[in-house]
Image (cartoon, grey):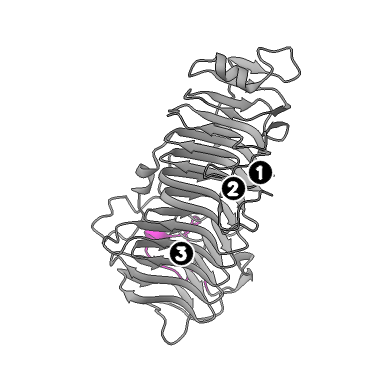
């Protein structure tokens, strides 16, 4: 498991900022291998609810297995909640989440890891459903002061409670994890993570009527992920770092809200090649250090709202739109604001080398691909170190820059 704190220390900002030490001539390597490259896992013991294997229930397998055991689950619907009971076990559906289900009792979280489970604790290839809780533990899974990896896990039809995933003081990796068709209290969120750190790659969240998709009071990194919310916040980050790369966050209210205390302004909000779409504001960041390259900030009222941000903040090669303002910096200052495209008003910030014109998206806000005649093509920073993957000058928007994927 990769400590997210180390990943968040990596920055690809302007070389003039003294705190940046990363070589800006190359893309940041996240150190996360593609799941397809991992060798198949061979179980030490097998669970089959139909019989004929080592165990009939997952709970029996957990009770009988020492830490380090690989527990394979044959396709089946396993009824009953499970608890890792402090053991670092690798529990996985042999044929994946589409055919392997853990059906909760309906009286509490389906899965618990709350007894100091350590490196090697993994749950993979399962669908988790039927959870319910009236407490702070998530209806799907609760993790306290433990290290857990979730891979190819589907959370669906888990009801009641303030969250589906709840983690406190935990280190969590979520790889190919999805949350869909769950119900939580209207004041709650799909995931609630306090302290610790989280890394999510190819995660999808549909938060339906929840107040927010993700509540973070920890250091969190999202790669190639999608958060779609119908109410107040897509991501609510309080007092710690949030890092988005090649991700999309959407909400009817504020897509990403990130706030630190006014006495430090040390926390960082990183946005690279990501799209934030808010019914009111795309991103509102206060008392933080914002680093943003090659994004789209699309807000119903304001695209990017920077308040009392750290003076080392910068926003480049991005497009920002709002009916009132594209980018605004009502209080404080930024290190660099340039090479952007902004549809702004008279009181909004524009910065240097910024264009103010129709962007030529294929179908915003659903599709931010640039049309062939878009003025955002080759309109970004001309620095050779920030060229597009094809070697041409940086395109403004989510597909340009060193870490862009190029136009679809």
Whole-angstrom CA distance, mark 1 to mark 2, is: 9 Å
Indicate whether 309 appears above or below 74: below
Residue at 54 percent across and 15 percent down: it is 65
Residue 166 placement (x, y as % from top left) = 51, 43
Q: Which residues are magenta?
A: 376-393
Say if residue 253 shows up in the picture: yes
The answer to if 386 sits in the magenta stretch is: yes
Task: Name the foreground residue: 87 vs 326.
Answer: 87
Q: Quarter of the image containing the N terminus?
A: top left
The answer to if 342 sits in the magenta stretch is: no
Residue at 72 percent across and 20 percent down: it is 49
Whole-angstrom CA distance, mark 2 to mark 3, is: 46 Å
Mark 1 — residue?
Answer: 158
Numbered mark located on residue 161 in the image = 2
Give the foreground label among 1 and 3. Answer: 1
Mark 3 — residue?
Answer: 394
Say if residue 32 shows up in the picture: no
């Amino acid at each position: 498991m990769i400590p997210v704190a180390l990943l968040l220390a990596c920055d690809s900002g302007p070389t003039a900022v003294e705190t940046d030490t990363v070589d800006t001539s190359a893309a940041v390597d996240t150190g996360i291998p593609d799941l397809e490259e991992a060798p198949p896992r061979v179980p030490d013991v097998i669970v089959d609810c139909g019989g004929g294997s080592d165990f009939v229930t997952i709970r029996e397998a957990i009770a009988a297995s020492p830490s380090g055991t690989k527990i394979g689950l044959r396709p089946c619907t396993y009824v009953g909640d499970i608890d890792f009971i402090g053991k670092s076990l690798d529990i996985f559906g042999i044929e994946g989440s589409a055919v392997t289900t853990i059906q909760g009792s309906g009286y509490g979280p389906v899965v618990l890891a709350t007894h100091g489970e350590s490196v090697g604790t993994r749950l993979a290839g399962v669908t988790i459903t039927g959870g319910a809780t009236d407490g702070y533990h998530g209806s799907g899974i609760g993790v306290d002061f433990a290290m857990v990896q979730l891979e190819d896990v589907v959370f669906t039809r888990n009801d009641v409670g303030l969250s589906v995933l709840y983690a406190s003081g935990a280190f969590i990796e979520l790889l190919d994890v999805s949350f869909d068709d769950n119900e939580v209290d209207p004041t709650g969120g799909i995931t609630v993570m306090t302290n610790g750190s989280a890394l999510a790659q190819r995660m999808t969240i549909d938060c339906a009527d929840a107040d927010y998709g993700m509540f973070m009071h920890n250091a969190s990194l999202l790669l190639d992920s999608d958060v779609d919310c119908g109410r107040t916040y897509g991501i609510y980050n309080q007092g710690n770092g949030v890092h988005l790369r090649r991700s999309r966050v959407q909400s009817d209210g504020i897509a990403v809200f990130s706030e630190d205390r006014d006495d430090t302004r040390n926390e960082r909000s990183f946005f690279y090649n990501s799209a934030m779409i808010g019914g009111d504001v795309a991103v509102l960041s206060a008392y933080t250090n914002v680093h943003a390259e090659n994004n789209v900030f699309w807000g119903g009222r304001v695209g990017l709202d920077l308040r009392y941000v750290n003076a080392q903040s910068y926003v480049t090669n991005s497009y920002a739109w709002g009916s009132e303002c594209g980018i605004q910096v009502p209080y404080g200052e930024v290190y660099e604001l340039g090479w952007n495209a902004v549809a702004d008003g008279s009181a909004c910030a524009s910065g240097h080398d910024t264009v103010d014109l129709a962007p030529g998206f294929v179908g915003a806000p659903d599709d931010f691909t640039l049309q062939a005649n878009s003025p955002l093509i080759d309109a970004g920073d001309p620095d050779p170190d920030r060229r597009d993957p094809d070697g041409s000058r940086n395109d403004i928007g989510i597909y340009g820059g060193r870490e862009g994927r190029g136009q679809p």
